[in-house]
Image (cartoon, grey):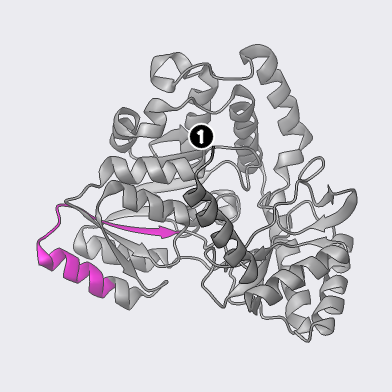
Amino acid sequence: MSSKILDTFLNENIAELKDRGLYNEIDPVQGANGPRIKIEGKELINLSSNNYLGLSTDDRLKKVAKEAVNTHGVGAGAVRTINGTLDLHIELEKRLAEFKGTEAVISYQSGFNCNMAAISAVMDKNDAILSDQLNHASIIDGCRLSKAKIIPFNHSDMDDLRKKAKEAVESGQYKKIMVITDGVFSMDGDVANLPEIVEIAEEHDLITYVDDAHGSGVLGKGAGTVKHFGLQDKVDFQMGTLSKAMGVIGGYVAGKSNLIDWLKARSRPFLFSTAVSPADAAASIKAIELLMESTELHDKLWENGNYLKEGLKNLGFNIGDSETPITPCIIGDEKDAQKFSKRLYEEGVYAKSIVFPTVPRGAGRVRNMPTAAHTKEMLDEAITAYEKVGKEMGLI
């Protein structure tokens, strides 16, 4: 017999989420997650994917993934420290280090795992972490797990960061102090002010950590936000994922060899969880090769991003201050954002509503992500739907 207390808690809170427009409906995609998708038999233009470069359906990645299954099987078979480290994992880390311009790399099962693993392996209760208020949930959870004192600073506010860094150092309370930020903020598309963050870090001897999940493949001709600013030698931790622009699954941390050696010895997801599959590792290696050989996909992503931005902005939508192809349409009210998303769905466009706690209360939106795989015709269809629904709802 199930717990009555638990049932009451769950039913009441789910009902409240639905009433406030904060409950997220999950829509299973029938088939591949490409520029067009099918849900419940309905074909839609897909503007909700993080498959920035279209690589999740790329034939070249599919080919090497199939070959890896034939040669290495479907799973690694053990945790990495026993005998689950395959030659493919070593090759993946070698290629990533070259790609990111660092001495070494450690790979993990996901970007979320990276932040849980790396932050808590280095920071502890005697330390402090200066964290941007809009940092990703995985950063927040990684900081909490470390038990370090978390000192939030106002989003991209360098004066506030400098003030709080000075106070933390002068307090004498902490052995180590880290400053941590997203490279690209995924809900607004703005870019961290890394040059000034590094300057402040050097002034106060802070450890620097950049979560570049949404910057890799997008900035720095594909190599990411840190490379974009030419700061590879100034940032201690470069974290990235293989599940967004790379189109596969997994994550990694890039940095100096001694950092990576420490993470291999002390980061718990590395020590106690089986590594990504051979197919995932092989496909990720191929994706990195493609990005290192050519900027074609990167350039097409930016071309499509700028095209959609211009179209929605000209219609009168509030697209915020995005500096990347990420294009939010900020509605405000959570229920209106969900209604807007549902009407777009009916008009053939899949753009999911994003509400609290992913974004602040009253900042409900749909987040549009044009990819390198979209055609101009697809984007024109989407813009036409936005115009129709926007006028119908009085948003433009």
The residue located at (59%, 59%) in the rendering is 14
**Where, quadrant-wise, is the N terminus in this rendering?**
top right
Q: Position of residue 105 (x, y in %)?
A: 42, 35
The correct choice, above or below, for 67 with respect to 201 in the image is above
Q: Residues within 10 Å of mark 1 (few under 14, many from 20)?
A: many
- Please name the residue shown 17% across and 71% down the image: 167
**Residue 83 visible in image:** yes
Residue 392 image point, x, y percent: 84, 82
Position of 374 relative to 88 (above/below): below
Tell which residue pokes out farthest to the left in this image.
Answer: 172
Q: Is residue 392 left or right of residue 72?
A: right
Label 1 sits on residue: 109
Residue 116 falls in image quadrant: top left
Q: Is residue 215 visible?
A: no
How many marks on residues?
Answer: 1
Residue 208 colored magenta?
A: no
Where is residue 380 drawn, in percent x and y?
87, 68
Q: Amino acid at mark 1?
A: Gln
Residue 206: image quadrant is bottom left
* Nearer-the-camera pick, 141 or 22: 22
In the image, residue 89 sits, relative to residue 13, either above or below, namely above
- Give the magenta part as a residue range: 162-182
